[in-house]
Image: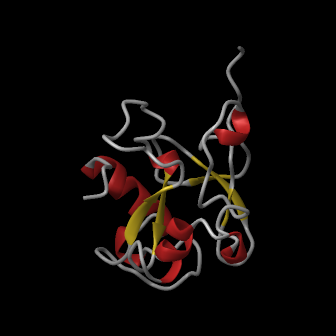
Amino acid sequence: MSGFSPRVRLLVRTRAGSGDPFAATCEACGIWLGEHGGQLQHRLARGRGGSRDPVVRSAANAALLCGTPMTFCHGNAESRDPEHGMEARGFVIRHGVGPEFDPRFVPLILFGGVKRWLSETEACYLHEPPAQEAA
């Protein structure tokens, strides 16, 4: 189980399929995954026991990747190995304080080198980061 709600899973798959969940592709390498292939990666790990943080449970914190936690793009993200470049591309976010640790403000570098931000609630990529709330 991914830890994401069915609604979030559908949002992410629809986003990765450019509006069509049946056309979903791996957001890291571009391989076709379709309606059921691949797995969702928590960009910011939820930790043992899950997380109550709505951002961590949102589509902004989820990436659709090919493989399993041990293989292909999902395995590369889970390994946290800098050689794979998944953190540099936004597929892995370290824990910390500030916008550089918030999935809403850390862009993904998608297959093909396109930089996009992720919506918490919409099945689309954002061309710019959302406005940050005043502290």
Q: Is residue 16 left or right of residue 110?
A: left
Q: How is the image coloured?
A: secondary structure
Q: Is residue 90 above or below residue 121?
A: below
Q: Position of residue 79 (x, y in %)?
A: 54, 70
Q: Is residue 68 above or below residue 78?
A: below
Residue at image coords 50%, 66%: 78
Q: Is residue 82 left or right of residue 27?
A: right
Residue at image coords 56%, 81%: 30
- Comparing 56 with 7, the one in front is 56
Residue 80 in which image quadrant:
bottom right
- Comparing 51 with 64, the one in front is 51
Residue at image coords 33%, 57%: 10
Question: Residue furthest toward the top?
Answer: 135
Residue at image coords 32%, 49%: 4
Q: Position of residue 2 (x, y in %)?
A: 31, 57
Quarter placement of the C terminus: top right
